[in-house]
Image: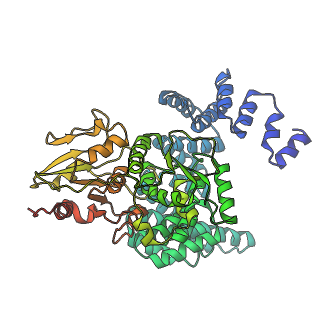
Amino acid sequence: MTQKDLFYISRKNYKEIYALSCDDYAGALLACEEGNYEKAQVILEDMKEQSSYVLLLLLRVYGNLQDATPPPEKIQNIVDKLLTREHDYTFTFELTLILVSYSFYDEAEILFEKLLKQEPYSKELWLNYALAHKYTNDEKSLAIVEKAYHHFLEYKQELEKEKNPSKEKEELLNALDDFLYMRLVVELAYLNFRLYRYDNALNVFKKVENYNAKNPQFFLFYALTLEYTGYYDKAYKCYKRAISLNADIYTSFEFSKFCLRLGRFEEGFLYYETRLHAASKFTFSQRHYDAAYAAFYENKNFLHGKKVLVYCEQGYGDTIMFSRILRSLSKVAKEVIFCPQSALFSLFNTHIQTLQKQNKIQSNLKVFAQIPQDFDYAVPICSLYFFLGVYNAKTIAKLPSPLISVEKKTRMQRAKVGICFRTSTIPHTQSLFYRNIDLEFLLEAFDGLDVELVNFTLYQKGELELPANIKDVSFELNDWLATSEALREVDLLVSIDSAIAHLSLALGIPTLVLLGDRFDWRWGKIESPKSIFWQKAHFCRVNQEGPSGIKKQICKILNYKVP
């Protein structure tokens, strides 16, 4: 190894290090360092000698490809080859982490156990072993954390018994204390929270709070637990403490949602801007957003008299909910160009044009299917409350939807009730709440009720088998305009937290939102759900109230007698 090699290694200049070699493997590493995974894929797949290093890097590359991910059988073939070969500790550790990323949990567990026999006191190894199952199997993760805790506690106690004081031993004991009480115990408490063992979680957090005085992760996890158990004042202090210690994007985003849950809109919408950086990438353009953000701090009225493009970077439900601010923007802007998601275009375009013909909404609000080139500022729809300074809860509650409300009608026959009991969106593994409920559970709520059920739950053919007495309109819902027309035929929508619930509320249709023990900030406080955005929404916490509670709410809304 030359002095030049050593120089670049000392500087951690990996691009220069890889460039020193003409080997194809080095070229693939350089492509990865530059973020060009497609190029790395071509290089690696063309290499004749498919060594373990090449195969491991291929797995890493495949995991970073945006499109054209190889079929599962190809991944399986590479994994099988690697598992039949012998590797050193470092390589095996990296392979284990890759296996976890591809959800090969059983294979990874075997390797974790093998590695622990070689390095039984590796803190990094134990922690990765425990976190491998976090979010996918919190129960198992908790068991591993507890095992690690007792393992290192015994190790510490053995060291303390040895009568050979030294600076090295003291440093080792301090490091063990930090690992025990700042990593393992904190994870222990948080996993108890995720598993709904709130008393256990709160007790553990309280015991180690002083030890974690400078640990931002501790205060974030503690704040989340306090928020979802209704201790809002303490939660607020913990969120602020976490941000003061480390103002990372994730913590700031969680704090914003907490503030919005409580109706602290000025602070909430300020921090809610971090959602754009928390996402993997901007839907539109960070350059355009940054220009708007800079203009806002120079002049709070920067959108007044301007041609403003409003784009949508979040889900359909958010677009529908936040679209209530469009009228406010149209009052001050010269022109508003609204570009909703393509699936929502016909809905907003049809409704807004109809309202404009009736002189019920501003004429300077235009709906575009494609993003135009000519505008002064481009802002995300979810940022408009912040940019317009709309923070007053009463003002927000009174903002009208740009969609046409359903006219109240006299019911001449039995009520039609729409149902939506699951979403097709795969829940994020880190999600704190699960929205879907079983159809059988929901149908219990309708026992003895003289209603016609209409299914709005989307599913693939053959995926669900609905009872014959349920009218299924789901395959007719080609876009959100069609969905809105179908919703107009029902007297009530009973739905989980979903985009269709937001649409139903925007149309003025009586809506019963079914919530779990933990739910999204948009529906208000945990102990007493109420939405500032949708004042007429009805709620039922299904795990607490059960089918009978849902039935009571349905009867109350429809003015039925409870059977």
Q: Residue at x 68, y 29 (%)?
A: 39
Q: Quadrant of residue 302?
A: bottom right
Q: Residue at x 59, y 48 (%)?
A: 282
Residue situated in front as seen by the camera: 341 or 180: 341
Colour treatment of the image? rainbow
Image quadrant in which the C terminus is located: bottom left
Residue situated in front as seen by the camera: 216 or 439: 439
Can residue 468 be seen from the camera position used here? yes
Give the number of callouts.
0
Residue situated in front as seen by the camera: 390 or 235: 390
Q: Quadrant of residue 181?
A: bottom right
Whole-percent x and y of residue 155?
Answer: 58, 65
Image quadrant in which the N terminus is located: top right
Residue situated in front as seen by the camera: 293 or 251: 293
Q: Residue at x 66, y 25 (%)?
A: 42
Q: Quadrant of residue 454?
A: top left
Residue 167, above or below 108: below
Whole-percent x and y of residue 97?
Answer: 57, 45
Residue 29, above or below 533: above
Whole-percent x and y of residue 260?
Answer: 47, 67
Can residue 262 be seen from the camera position used here? no
51 left or right, relative to 355: right
407 left or right, relative to 78: left
Whole-percent x and y of residue 171?
Answer: 70, 70
